[in-house]
Amino acid sequence: MLSEKAPQLMDTVGALLGSGIAEKDLPRHMQGRQNGMKIWAIEQVLASDEGKKLWDPVLDGYALPLVFRVLGVWLKVREEGADEGNKGLLALPRIEHALYVSYLVMLF
């Protein structure tokens, strides 16, 4: 997707990978991971101003309503009595159902 929507960002990823960064220069949690260098480079590019133009509309437009939907289901499950069973197991299918329906609404 990154190469389709913003090919200049992929060029920047390539430049970062070719800049002489070594594995020891990566953050500790990225060292030793498969494709750690590439993941780090993509993170750096997406954190830039140009990268934010790509993913900010996604977060602004879609994530917030989904968060509110999940919180609403979670609060509804908490209100139910103890005789209903494990609240975590009760909430999971309901949250999945709410998210699937929300995705379908956004698609169509």
Image: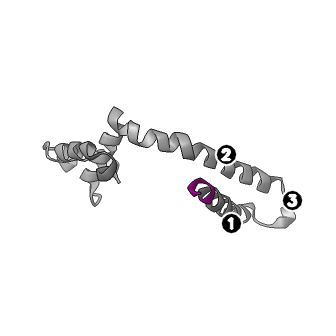
Q: Nearer the viewer, residue 76 or 24?
A: 76
| Secondary structure category for the residue under label 3 | loop
Q: Which residue is mark 2?
A: 68
Q: Which residue is mark 3?
A: 81
Q: Main secondary structure of the magenta part?
A: helix
N-term-proximal mark, 1 vs 2: 2
User: Does residue 98 show up?
Assistant: yes
Viewport quadrant of the C terminus: bottom right
Residue in the image at 59% along x and 53% along y: 106
Name which quarter of the figure residue 1 lies in: bottom left
Q: Nearer the viewer, residue 54 or 38?
A: 54
* Residue 93 numbered mark, or none: 1
- Name which residue type carries label 3: Gly
Do callouts 3 and 2 mark residues in contact (Cβ within 8 Å)? no
Q: Is residue 96 above or below residue 55?
A: below
Query: Is residue 76 magenta-colored?
Result: no
Outermost residue to the front: 108
Q: Nearer the viewer, residue 39 or 107?
A: 107
- Name which residue type carries label 2: Phe
Residue in the image at 67% along x and 52% along y: 70
Residue 34 location (% of width, % of height): 28, 61
Residue in the image at 39% along x and 37% along y: 52
Q: Is residue 104 above or below residue 14?
A: below
